[in-house]
Image (cartoon, grey):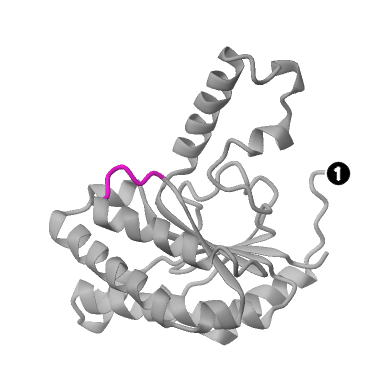
Amino acid sequence: MSITSVGIIPDGNRRYAKKQGLNLVQSYQLGTAKAWQLLDWLSDYKEIKTGTFYTLSLENLTRSKIELNALLKIFDKQLDQIFKNPVFEEKRIHLKFIGKFDAFPERLKQKIFEVQDYTSSFGEKVIQLAFGYSGRAEIVDAARALALDHSEGKVDLDSVNEESFKKYLYSHETDPDLIIRTSGEKRLSGFLTYQSAYSELYFSDKYWPEFSRSDFDLAIKEYNERKRNFGK
């Protein structure tokens, strides 16, 4: 079955920094540069219409203020680059953000909405950035929204099924066929909890800043060699 959607968990920035004797800011800058490269990799696979990148989890928000501030500053600067980089229009990439944005500065939230609006007409490929994201929180928020609609008479509970429930999730895109995680850790850490039920998983031992185009190609190749049964 052809791959149409892929998720990326870019893990290992801090361990890479320790290994290379870098500070965290340098390591995260390298990780961000790798994310820009990922846009080119995904664009070369025409059949892949959706990519979801685990940018920042809700749990990450409990990190030290120094580290969190450094991360948000880098992210803020990268949002500015989106308006200057022609790749989004040239390769028709629509950026979407999924997660809970309440904990972030108002200025940053405004930029997120501006970026989504700016790229909204570039719809051939969707790149989702999971930012302030938790799979469990997504399901809880979806259940709350469904309960509210039911209380207002907008939905009949007998009509609710797995597919109709999806419209209440942050992400309405295609479930990921493949999820790639770097750094050797073999878990999803709350990434796309609902959507990943039948995703194929690929774990790379390389830290995210080390992950290369050939590593990405190998993951896609291995996926294409697998047989998916979806529990049947």
Left or right? Give the position of 28 relative to 124. left
Image height of 146 relative to 2, above or below: above
Residue 185 visible here: no
Q: Secondary structure at mark 1?
A: loop
Q: Main secondary structure of the magenta part?
A: loop
Left or right? Give the position of 38 relative to 101. right
Left or right? Give the position of 158 relative to 211. right
Image height of 193 relative to 218, above or below: above
Tell me if residue 103 is in the magenta stretch.
yes
Looking at the rendered structure, the kind of residue marked 1 is: Lys
Q: Residue at x 52, y 82 (%)?
A: 87
Q: Where is residue 41 shown, x and y percent of the image?
A: 59, 81
Q: Residue at x 37, y 75 (%)?
A: 32
Q: Residue at x 58, y 25 (%)?
A: 146
Q: Where is residue 46 shown, x and y percent of the image?
A: 72, 77
Q: Could you tell me which quadrant the C terminus lies in?
A: top right
Q: Residue at x 58, y 83 (%)?
A: 90
Residue that sits furthest to the right in the current view: 232
Image height of 130 relative to 140, above or below: below
Q: Could you tell me which quadrant the N terminus lies in?
A: bottom right
Q: Where is residue 223 shown, x and y percent of the image?
A: 72, 69
Residue 72 visible here: yes
Q: Residue at label 1?
A: 232
Q: Where is residue 6 shown, x and y percent of the image?
A: 63, 64
Q: Which residues are magenta?
A: 100-104
Density class for disc 1 (Cα within 10 Å; few <14, some 14-19, many ≥20) is few
